[in-house]
Amino acid sequence: MERRIVVEKLEQTPKEDQQIELVERKAIGHPDSIADGLSETVSRSLSRMYMEKYGKILHHNTDETQIVGGQAHAEFGGGLVLEPIYILLVGRAVTRVGNDRLPYRTVALGAARKYLQKNFASLDVEVDVSLDCRISQGSEDLRGLYETSEDLSNDTSFGVGYAPYSETERIVLDTANYINGQLKAEFPAFGEDVKVMGARDTDDINLTIAVAMVDRHVADADEYQNLVSTMKEKAHDFATKYTDRNINVYVNTADDPSKDLYYLTVTGLSMENGDDGSVGRGNRSNGLITPGRPMSMEASAGKNPVTHVGKLYNLLSTRIANDIIEGTGGDIKEAYVRLLSQIGSPVSHPFVADAQLIPAPGVDVNKYNSDVTAIFEDHLDNIARLKNDILADKVTVF
């Protein structure tokens, strides 16, 4: 089957040359990111169960996880979680094959508990969380798409991706991950609930960072202020490695010591005290929220990795865009890729595949038509590579 692949020139100012740029990342401990993470780990665990028992991934979508914030009393030296956080795992899945009843709820709940225990050091999962599972049998028509010899799209939807990251985008993404990783390991008082907002105005990059502090690791207000200063200094030093632009860093700007207001938590997570979370309300599949860039509203986390283009096409389009940039030797400044599916058609054959290219001055994008088309063909011919990378935990979706 022949594919319709379009390569076109995009008349647009490259992101680095625009005056204002806004970029956000909700790190792994933000309630929306926790919902994404739980949905995705449940999907991958169900996929592995299906593969082990039947040699293929059966129908499921677990992309509707909801988090209802609890209640807590935080204070310097250590506080209490007063009411547990309620987490609801929702979705559809194959729960029975012939006479075989599958342990889907056990698998889902076990995967969710392990994810919370692994990623959130100050959260007592058995005490601080009420975990519920309402995953149920999927619809017959969608499950039927899995019974064909070829993987067929279970939705009419599109995915978008772009490359490369701008300086500001890379700084925001890597700074958030640096705080959650190296800094968290060095300073246990830094919780996992972190948000980084980047605002670039020409050559000034302003980072506003919110980080939940773990109360039992903070003795008093003076130590809290020292930790805020440490965060500001280390984040600034980290970000300046990426750019010659001026970096300004602001940390926990809602604090008001005169009113005894601090971003202090028991668990390092704002969901302990009323903050709710839902799948798809946070980062896009490339890990960022980027107004000014094309984005799909699809939630990639929790969707099955075989036929759900809401996941596959967003991830694949980003891979294609990156390969275009790498394969054109600097002649293409930015690449934007769009893939549109049609329900019931093979996922390897999009209804439309489109690359919009911003060339360097004097470069004719037509010289790269065949190269770009070949990149599309390779990724679509081998779309199973993406599924395998997802199951091998080589792909992040938020």
Image: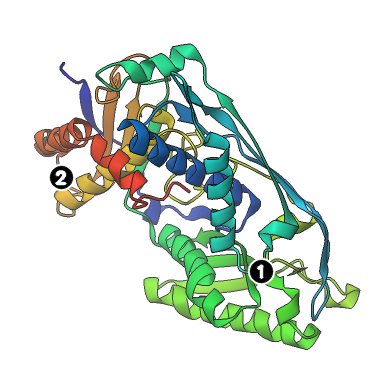
Disc 1 crowd rating (10 Å Cα; few below 14, some 14-19, many 20+) is many
Which disc number belongs to residue 363? 2
Whole-percent x and y of residue 202?
47, 61
Q: Could you say whether the residue bearing mark 1 is in a helix, strand or loop?
A: loop
Q: Height in image: 16 above or below 381?
A: below
* Image quadrant assignment for residue 124: bottom right
Whole-percent x and y of residue 166?
38, 57
Query: Is 57 in front, or is 63?
Result: 57
Q: What residue type is labelled 1?
A: Ser
* Image quadrant assignment for residue 213: bottom right
Q: Residue at x 22, y 49 (%)?
A: 325
Residue located beneath label 1 in the image? 122
User: For the residues carrying marks 2 and 1, which lies nearer the camera in this image?
Assistant: 1
In the picture as drawn, the residue positioned furthest to the front comes out as 99
Query: Is 332 in front, or is 44?
Result: 44
Residue 105 seen in render: yes
Residue 360 seen in render: no
Whole-percent x and y of residue 241?
39, 76
Q: Distance between the residues labelled 2 and 1?
A: 54 Å
**Dot 2 or dot 1, earlier in sequence:** 1
Query: Is 26 in front, or is 113?
Result: 113
Q: Residue at x 10, y 33 (%)?
A: 370
Is the N terminus in the top left, top right, bottom left or bottom right quadrant? top left
Q: What residue type is labelled 2?
A: Val
